[in-house]
Image: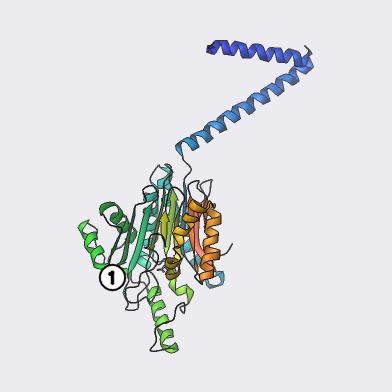
Amino acid sequence: MAFSGLQTVFATVAIVNCIKQFATGGNRMNESIFQACFRLFLYFGVWVVVVGFVYSQELVSGSRIGIAIHGGAGTILKENMSPEEEETYRAELREALLVGYEILKGGGSSLDAVEKAINILEDSPLFNAGKGAVFTNSGTNELDASIMDGKTLNAGAVAAVKHTKNPISLARLVMEKSPHVMLVGEGAAVFAEKLGMKPVPQEYFYTEKRWLQLQKIKAREKSVAPDKPVPRGSQSRTEKFGTVGVVALDQDGNLAAGTSTGGMTNKRFGRVGDSPIIGAGTYANNQTCAVSATGHGEYFIRGVIAYDVSALMQYGGLSLAEAADKVIREKLGAMGGSGGIIAIDREGNIAMPFNTAGMYRGYMDRNGKPVIRIYRD
Ligand code: ASP
């Protein structure tokens, strides 16, 4: 039997009156206590309904968004940085984070958030990506980048590009406008021009800080062993790190990851690191997580680090935090590699383990506030 709205109201009033009669026994004093309790009960009920409604809307629309960012890992120590310098880094990271977050909040895709946030860091001279890229042994700048869409498992990458202002945007074009995953050097430049991307001269990438870093390493090399190639890991760790990366989760539950870098100072012979290698420096899969790495690329390539985190979740049933910790603190460390990752899963959980002294990093907390960290704190 179906009740009309009015019948329901009458029935509810009758039931409440019965309970009232039973509870108060007609006593006036008891009646006012009953009314106060009843009002409290009513307020609590309304609160439960409102909170439940908001929460269910969140779940239905999948609107739990999230974003995390890194600006490189290495021997980043508080004693080596002035408060002003530290604040400049924090401000740049915060700006990039907010650009990405606003896109996600407005219903934009995780791919857009990743690309646009990375563009900000690529345009900054502070980070080893885009404008602030490090120098190769021959005094050039060769940039690498990759991006991955967790929904489709599509990916795009470029390596050793010399005239691209924003390599992450070119990587995205490779993913979306070519049948390939990775383009390198001259071929990537031709592809970029074909799609209307204006090339920049190599001078665009000149920054005094990076140039001096190269000179310092070269001088050290000469004094140690003038004729021999540099042994692995002999560079000062501050001189070789500074890559940028972003991972994001959008309102549709799609994950994306991107990484952009100038590689390692003094690199030779067309060396390419992990950043443009899907599975090593970048990986995203809606089933598991999105990952962007930074550190000594050779180890990240051999350890297939970014994919390993995803695989531990997919096949091993580990949580994001467990998988990320295992790969960075146990596996990478045991291999002798240094660096870190940022990662986000489809629930918006974030992990940022690293085994270096510091890692420029940040994320938006559950209240939409940016959190920026640099050191081990
Ligand atoms: N992973 C980058 C590379 O090896 C460097 C870095 O993250 O700083 O090219």
**Left or right of 132, for residue 237:** right
Residue at 48 percent across and 74 percent down: it is 237
The x, y position of residue 372, in whole percent, is 52, 57
Q: Nearer the viewer, residue 340 or 308?
A: 308
Q: Is residue 76 visible?
A: no
Q: Is residue 291 visible?
A: yes
Question: Which residue is identified by label 1?
Answer: 202
Circle 1 packing at 10 Å, graded few (<14), some (14-19), many (20+), is some
The x, y position of residue 275, in whole percent, is 39, 64
Q: Nearer the viewer, residue 256 or 238?
A: 256
Which element is circle 1 on?
A: helix
Residue at 41 percent across and 87 percent down: it is 222
Residue at 42 percent across and 51 percent down: it is 285
Among the 4 quarters of the image, the one containing residue 191: bottom left
Residue at 75 percent across and 14 percent down: it is 22
Amino acid type of disc 1?
Gln
The x, y position of residue 296, in whole percent, is 45, 70
Classify 61 as above or below 284: above
- In the picture, the quarter occupied by the N terminus is top right
Classify 358 as above or below 54: below
The residue sitting at the left extreme is 194
Q: Nearer the viewer, residue 204 or 73?
A: 73
Quarter of the image where ligand 1 sits: bottom left
The x, y position of residue 150, in whole percent, is 40, 50
- In the picture, the quarter occupied by the C terminus is bottom right
